[in-house]
Image (cartoon, rainbow, N blue to C red):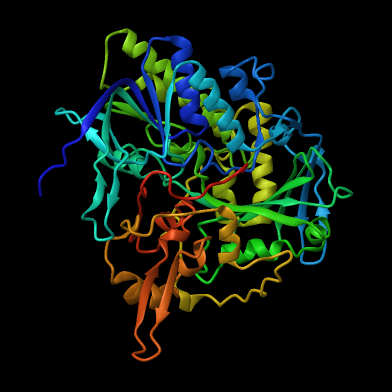
Amino acid sequence: MAETERESMEYDVVIVGAGPAGLSAAIRLKQLDADLDVVVLEKGSEVGAHILSGAVLDPCGLNALIPDWKDKGAPLNVPVRHDNFYMLGAEGQMRLPNFAMPPLMNNHGNYIVSMGNVCRWMAEQAEALGVEIFPGMSCSALVYRPDGSVKGVVAGEFGRNADGSEGPSYEPGVELHGKYVMLGEGVRGSLSKQVIDKFALDNDSDVQKYGLGMKEIWEIDPEKHREGTVTHTMGWPLGKNAGGGSFIYHLENNQVYVGFVVHLNYRNPHLYPYMEFQRFKHHPMVAELLKGGKRVAYGARAISEGGWQSMPRADFPGGVLLGCSVGLVNVPRIKGNHNAMLSGKAAAEAAHDAIKAGRAGDRLESYDAELREGPIGKDLKRVRNVKPLWSRLGLTASLTLGGFDMWTNNLFGLSLMGTLGHGKSDAAATGRAADYPPLDYPKPDGKLSFDRLTNVSFAMTNHEESQPAHLKLKDASVPVKFNLPEYAGPSARYCPAGVYEFVTDDKSGETRFQINFQNCVHCKTCDIKDPAQNIVWTVPQGGDGPNYPNM
């Protein structure tokens, strides 16, 4: 097959992903040298279209990057005023006293935000400095130098037929070359996976762990709205079936963010994360809050949860990994945006120094060192045992031991437990269907809880149907011949968008595996949780996917 010929464009730095990490890198590069040529490529239809986060933002990253962000109109409008932690049972709840929480859990000084809107504002700041930002540009491949270092990316390929052949309106895209390439694709990015594998960046790190975060935006009765209130819950409905919990954040305009996280190392393949979220909203405390309200948006995304011990090496020949491509979420704080911003700033400073010294295409080793030794490393290292304790011991024991470990780290800067390992990958943790009981879920009522496909319509996701499916199977026979009999077809449940179905023909009785890729919200759960690791998430053509308004 002949190699596709493409035009190329030259830059000093090419950044993939207009999230908080990529935009921070772009802004910092232009702050350091206004003459640097910097480009940011974003697969969403606009900046913010694919951004989904809680989010309670620790402003430390923004303070370091743009100290006068308040004067410049950053959309941080709702400071946290009240902080609540609850343990839920099926019919009631117990509030956990704030004084018992380690100081790092305190949200005083943080803000309830839409990270989509924060990123839109950051893009404005970047463009004002001269950064070129191209939304609707999926980066589908890496470009290498003869010495094997990363030279750039292929972006903007459009018009392939469903079978992969070139259609009548085919556009080959363009190669964007840089002295350095920064990958800020978010969790489980397709290009990031490739460089981690090619350069063995995870050889010295533990397995990465993940959660699935699902979120709805509700407009509620003004009488019930408490602007600035942050609530987190644990316990029901997951119980011993999985780790996870919820968040309820009261922002402005009588709106509330309602979210639910399920740790993806659950064993019972019958578990249905989306339905756990829907059931959660029927808890009396939550149902009373939402009663009479209206759900206005829905979305989902995976969350990196491995923390300190799961960070791969972040530099590679010709570039770096940023933010969630490394896995910089502080799990007990449920925060990673501040670290994403700090990582972008650190990467920009390392690249600037290298370019100033006449370098290109080598490793930015000082960046990886800064991640581990600087404020990001300090933030993650002190909570490194919370996730493995939860995975090993369950909720109650991990609350006690994890809290103790965070207190000793806070008071004395050390852990009496050392650094605990995570064990199996989330895919390998999945148990056989025969070993676990099926789980029953109540039917959604259409008022508080909703069926999956109805909710997906509130993500405003869209994919051009004539293109090849961006969800690839390594072996097309595995879902029906292996996953269905051994694991009861878990993809039909772990996907929060209803992408995967096992369809049985009424006449022949044969079952086939159907991929409804048009529904995909780009959460990457299938790439993570599939027991056979048979599903590979790749980028669709640019502009496709969800169109989140203010997630």
Q: Residue furthest right?
A: 223
Q: Residue at x 29, y 50 (%)?
A: 159
Relative to 51, is 465 above or below? Answer: below
Q: Nearer the viewer, residue 229 or 397?
A: 229
Location of residue 14 in the rendering, given as x and y in whole percent from the top left corner = 35, 26
- Left or right of 63 on screen, residue 176: left
- Left or right of 398 on screen, residue 230: right
- Left or right of 439 on screen, residue 364: left
Q: Residue furthest front?
A: 168
For the C terminus, give its image quadrant: top right
Q: Residue at x 37, y 73 (%)?
A: 513
Relative to 506, is 266 above or below? Answer: above
Q: Residue at x 56, y 31 (%)?
A: 120
Q: Nearer the viewer, residue 290 or 425?
A: 290
Q: How many marks?
A: 0
Instruction: Say if residue 241 shows up in the picture.
Output: no
Instruction: Say if residue 520 shows up in the picture.
Output: yes
Location of residue 385 in the rendering, given as x and y in whole percent from the top left corner = 56, 42
Q: Nearer the viewer, residue 161 or 115?
A: 161
Q: Residue at x 37, y 11 (%)?
A: 353
Residue 332 placement: quadrant? top right
Q: Residue furthest left?
A: 2
Q: Nearer the viewer, residue 297 or 28?
A: 297
Residue 527 placement: quadrant? bottom left
Location of residue 238 in the rendering, given as x and y in whole percent from the top left corner = 65, 63
Location of residue 311 in the rendering, given as x and y in whole percent from the top left corner = 44, 37
Residue 197 placement: quadrant? top left
Relative to 119, is 254 above or below? Answer: below
